Image (cartoon, rainbow, N blue to C red):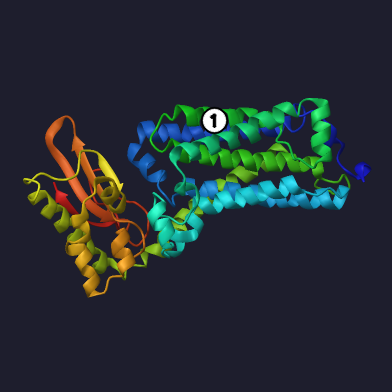
Amino acid sequence: MLTEHNQAQTAPGWAFGIRASIVANLLVLVVVGYVACLEVFFPDFYYSSLQEDEYLEWGTFWAFIGSAGVGVVIAARQWRGRRLIPWFAFGVALFCVFVAMEEISWGQRVLGYRPPAYFLENNFQQEFNVHNIFSTDIRKLVLKGVILGYGVVLPLIALLGPVRNVMERLAVVVPTVGLVPTFAATYGLYEWYPWTYTGETVELMLGLGFLFAAIIGARAWTPTRETNAARFGQPAVVAGAWAIVVGLGFANAVLARIEHSAATEYGELARVESEALKDDFLAMARSNRNRLVTSCDLHKRIYTFERNSRKPYLYRGKYAGLVKQGMAEERASFFLDPWNNPYWIRDRCDSDDSDARRVFVYSFGPNRRRDSNAWEIRGDDVGDYIHR
């Protein structure tokens, strides 16, 4: 019954959840400020923080998962309280689950399984996810459409009374207009792209935007008879959700390191394979008048490098010959390490010193995350220097 629901449901969008929205906007700003400080003052830590399976990526995962969980609660309340078909809330929840799982490549690096050959061949990151199969332009267009459509346009048009009434009858859960600054800032940062890996920060901001929108929006569908109705969506809940996302992000990154650090049984095999790849690149250099076939500031997966530069020798050299010694043909075809992650080639030059150049091949090693920087093979990464 309508009388059993929080009357704030019919309140204007600009007035509903305004205190919680202010806190939410500030917390997203804290994230942006933190990343900006890392980029300026701690570039090495910034670089490692934005890598796959690090705490920022896991924070994004938990933000979207949290949003999906709250969305399911909203859907249940819409059906139970007003017998509305919760298509929108449930659809947004499914979307958030999909994005969260895409963010961690459906557990590929966590579990260490090999993706199907289709994804190894057509996904430019050689990962088990859908979004990287499409071109960069399409991915950017979809992301911008989601940010602006859901976070900016929808709440603004819902300020019109007749439009909002129709949306409520159709069970559309409109993000509070108080979060428009968060979504607008997310879009602006994505357009500006001031730092390398800005996209990772944008994804975290978007995840937090969806989470805060769900938390604040859930209050409108909370029956007044429920004891938590007066508290749900308040600033303390928003701040608590932010703290949980941050805490789980750090915890996941630490646990992943502990778990994977024990998976060293393939270390010697990876060393043999990286040495074979080094020998293959040196052989190509000898046939190229002793000039390396890589170029300054190159950093690519070896499979991508081969496809772009057409170096068929890589399929005939020492690395490919390891198939006769038992290496899986699929690993050889897609240049995967024993943990089913890609081997990489890196060529780093110093523009101020013509003699400063490092070229090396490497894999992420047992922890399945990049520890190396632009100049050195570090951590448990397994690789070999071609030139230094």
Left or right: 176 as drawn, with respect to 387: right
**Above or below, 154 relative to 117:** above
Q: Horizontal and vertical percent for residue 78?
A: 81, 48
| Location of residue 35 (image quadrant) | top left
Q: What residue did someone put label 1 on?
A: 187
Left or right: 82 as drawn, with respect to 186: right
- Say which element carries label 1: helix
Q: Which residue sits at x=58%, y=52%?
A: 98
Q: Which residue sits at x=72%, y=46%?
A: 89
Bin the neighbour count of mark 1 within 10 Å (Cα to Cα): few under 14, some 14-19, many 20 and up. many
Q: Is residue 230 visible?
A: no
**Above or below, 320 relative to 296:** below
| Location of residue 266 (image quadrant) | bottom left
Q: How many marks?
A: 1
Q: Horizontal and vertical percent for residue 139?
A: 49, 40
Q: Is residue 190 visible?
A: yes
Left or right: 375 as drawn, with respect to 147: left
Q: Horizontal and vertical percent for residue 54?
A: 44, 50
Left or right: 86 as drawn, with respect to 284: right
Q: Horizontal and vertical percent for residue 107?
A: 49, 59
